[in-house]
Image (cartoon, helix red, strand yellow):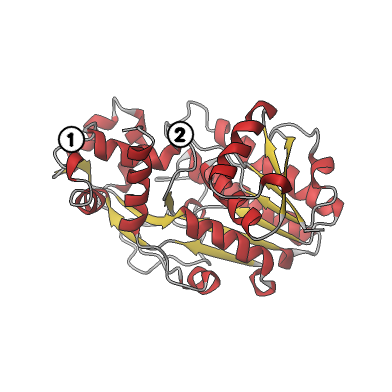
Amino acid sequence: MPDRVLLTGISGFLGGHVGLALLNAGFAVRGSLRDLRRAAPVREMLRRAGADVSRLEFVTLDLLRDEGWREAAQGCRYLQHVASPLTIRRPRDRDELIRPAVEGTRRALRAALFTGVDRVVLTSSTAAIMYGHPRARAEPFTDADWSRTEGDGVSAYTESKTRAELEAWSIMEAAGRRDDLAAINPAVILGPLLDDDLGTSAIMIKRLLDGSAPAAPRVNFGIVDVRDVAALHLNAMRAPQAGGQRFLAAAGTVSLIGLARALRPRFPRYAGKIPRFELPDWVARLYALFERDLADNVGSLGVKRIVDASRARSLLGRPFIPPAEAAAATAQSLIDRHLV
């Protein structure tokens, strides 16, 4: 009998890729959904991607409800807690992101501890590492850094991911099982889509291709390919030395205009729509007064955060897929699926 893994958030962009990696590695997967009507599309999505879905089952779980968590974890050797709320728009109430992130983590880990799961892998984020620090910081961010949970530059998403990961470590430490938790802290995740659900990162690439971003704000992102992030989740689950560790995952830091320049020669059909110039900071700040999608990035204008992802690279066991390749894979998926 293959070992069973409880995978929360299997219908999401990263969750689907983690599910695919687990199934391809021979594990049985119990994927959580908020609505079981999503089960058939998710099963078909993974089948089309080449997975053996005979080892796939589904359960209904809600990050904000107690029902079903212990039953879902029963019989599972591992927990992959990927589910977490994410929105491209700034929420009107910060608790729209913070409550489900923190409470969902609490429910997932307590269920895992109650049923005796061997290893928990938590999807965190560089949002839990790099924010609320001085803009002028020059030294690279590492797995040892933590974002502040209040103050300038701390968005609701940053606070949600930071508090959720802190909650996970606190729960495992209180149980005397810190070494049975590993956290993956990816930067902006790009790469091939498994279905037509764009998610937040793919929307960024779509806007570069479809002409809705005539100029690029002067922002920089850490980028990592979803296939590398899924592989890190798998390796962190199986490698004994990964326990008790955080893994900052980024292939590099690039500007939005840098991504645009990388995409233009690869997709000449869209070259005329891809932005060629950066937006002056004062214009971006003015635009943010009316465009909520940009508001949370105003504090990052002109800031370039450098990261040290050497621990994650070692766990991955090979070089990261370059940011330009990850962006191109996203763009190709959007084109192939007629989403742009």
Residue situated in front as seen by the camera: 10 or 254:
10
- Residue for point 52% across, 66% down: 143
206 over 117 or under it: above or below: above
Q: Is residue 131 visible?
A: no
- Residue for point 52% across, 27% down: 93
Q: In what element is the residue under mark 2?
A: loop
Q: Which residue was labeled with disc 1?
A: 214
Q: On the rendered structure, is 277 left or right of 59? A: left
- Residue for point 36% across, 32% down: 339
Counting from the top left corner in percent of width and height, residue 24 is at: 62, 57
Counting from the top left corner in percent of width and height, residue 179 is at: 72, 68
Q: CA distance from mark 2 to mark 1?
A: 24 Å
Residue 312: assigned label: none
- The quadrant of the picture occupied by the C terminus is top left
- Residue for point 32% across, 66% down: 138
Q: Nearer the viewer, mark 2 or mark 1?
A: 2
What is the crowding at mark 2: few (fewer than 14 residues within 10 Å), some, or many (at least 20)? few
Q: In what element is the residue under mark 1?
A: loop
Residue situated in front as seen by the camera: 246 or 334:
334
Counting residues from the start of the chain, the first of labels 2 and 1 encountered is 2
260 over 181 or under it: above or below: above
Q: Which residue was labeled with disc 2?
A: 196
Counting from the top left corner in percent of width and height, residue 94 is at: 53, 33
What is the crowding at mark 1: few (fewer than 14 residues within 10 Å), some, or many (at least 20)? some
Residue situated in front as seen by the camera: 231 or 101:
231
- The quadrant of the picture occupied by the N terminus is bottom right
Q: On the rendered structure, is 90 left or right of 179? A: left
Check disc 2 and give the amino acid type.
Asp
Q: Is residue 171 visible?
A: yes
Check disc 1 and give the amino acid type.
Pro
Counting from the top left corner in percent of width and height, residue 302 is at: 25, 51
